[in-house]
């Protein structure tokens, strides 16, 4: 029995889908990640669902407007902290 | 150098090397909580002033970013949100129950394809996130934007890890609903 067949024999879409967010949120160990990716790659349904969730997370991360603090405000805060440190 | 001068120098180093480098991330978080630049600046300033006051409880070289985010989040909840709370701002956590069955399916019942998200504009993503109730917006910002772990988010927000997961799940489904509606109005086609 080859590796792919062994994976297919124990493949469970529902169980794997429970783990998709853990994988994408970086909540898996290296071993768990490797096992997840091996399992997801043998099932088109799981792979498609995984890719949708991945694209969604990337769209949030890359799409949101990123704001930076005004340098003047940061300098003002820095001065206030320095004056308190000097007390 | 006196002991006082040594402590002052050490504290200055902590601020310059560990605290101030997080200023942009803190401001971004504050802005998306308040939607207002002045309020966000006030929140960040308040956070740094409080961090000075409580600096003895900070262990140098540990997770400064998570420590400061927790201070900012508490300031937002205890001071800013109380002042500005309007009748339609409801803590959804009070009545939304965690649904295992929803989580089991991963993508829920939403009919989406990855190309739909890839075609989204930043403005729509930002609008969708900003429209979430604060509790849900907070976990999305901490997880998907700032890349905190569930454990860190649990400590920052002061809720169990299970609640972090349920809020994330619910918040993401709300976002998907909104983005799907947007995609439909813009005629972004789903590939089947």
Image (cartoon, coloured by chain):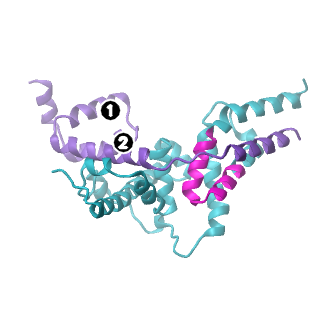
Chain colours: A purple, B cyan
Q: In the rendered view, would you say A27 is above or below A18?
A: above
Report in which chain the residue with disc 2 lies.
A
The quadrant where residue B128 appears:
bottom left
B112 vs B93: above or below: above
To which quarter of the image does residue B18 belong? top right
What secondary structure is found at the residue carrying circle 2? helix
**Percent from the top left, x then y, of residue B47?**
69, 49
Residue B116 lies, in percent from the top left, at: 28, 52
Q: Chain of mark 1?
A: A
Residue furthest toward the right? Answer: B2
Q: Residue furthest front?
A: B186
Are both tags, 2 and 1, on one chain?
Answer: yes
Q: Which residues are magenta?
A: B22-46
Q: Label 1 near label 2: C-beta < 8 Å?
A: yes
Tell me which secondary structure the magenta stretch mostly adopts. Answer: helix
The earlier-in-sequence mark between 2 and 1 is 2
Q: Is residue A19 left or right of residue A64?
A: left
- In-front residue for pair B183/A32: B183
Residue A86 can be seen in this image? yes
Secondary structure under badge 1? helix
Residue that label 1 marks: A32
Which residue sits at x=63%, y=69%? B84
Q: Which residue is mark 2?
A: A22
Is residue B51 or residue B159 the one in the foreground?
B51
Mark 2–mark 1 Cα distance, whole angstroms, equals 10 Å
For the point 50% across and 59% down, which residue is it? B135
Q: Position of residue B70 (x, y in %)?
A: 61, 48
Residue A15 in the figure: left or right of residue A31: left
């Amino acid at each position: 029995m080859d590796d792919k067949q062994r994976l297919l024999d124990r493949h469970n879409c529902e169980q794997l889908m429970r783990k998709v967010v853990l994988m994408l949120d970086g909540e898996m160990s290296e071993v768990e990640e490797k096992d997840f990716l091996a399992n997801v790659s043998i099932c088109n349904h799981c792979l498609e669902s995984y890719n949708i969730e991945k694209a969604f997370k990337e769209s949030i991360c890359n799409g949101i407007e990123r704001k930076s603090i005004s340098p003047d405000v940061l300098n003002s805060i820095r001065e206030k902290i320095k004056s308190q440190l000097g007390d | 150098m006196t002991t006082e001068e040594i402590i002052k120098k050490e504290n200055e180093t902590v601020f310059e090397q560990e605290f101030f480098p997080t200023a942009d991330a803190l401001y971004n978080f504050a802005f998306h909580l308040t939607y207002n630049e002045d309020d966000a600046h006030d929140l960040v300033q308040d956070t740094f002033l409080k961090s000075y006051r409580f600096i003895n409880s900070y262990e140098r070289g540990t997770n400064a970013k998570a420590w400061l985010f927790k201070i900012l989040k508490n300031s937002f909840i205890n001071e800013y949100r109380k002042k500005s709370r309007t009748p339609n701002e409801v803590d959804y956590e009070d009545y939304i129950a965690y649904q295992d069955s929803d989580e089991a399916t991963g993508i829920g019942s939403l009919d989406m394809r990855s190309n739909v998200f890839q075609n989204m504009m930043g403005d729509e993503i930002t609008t969708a996130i900003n429209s979430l109730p604060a509790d849900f917006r907070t976990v999305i910002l901490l997880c998907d934007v700032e890349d905190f772990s569930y454990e860190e988010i649990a400590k920052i927000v002061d809720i169990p890890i299970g609640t972090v997961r349920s809020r994330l799940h619910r918040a993401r489904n709300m976002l998907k609903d909104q983005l799907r509606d947007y995609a439909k109005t813009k005629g972004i086609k789903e590939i089947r």
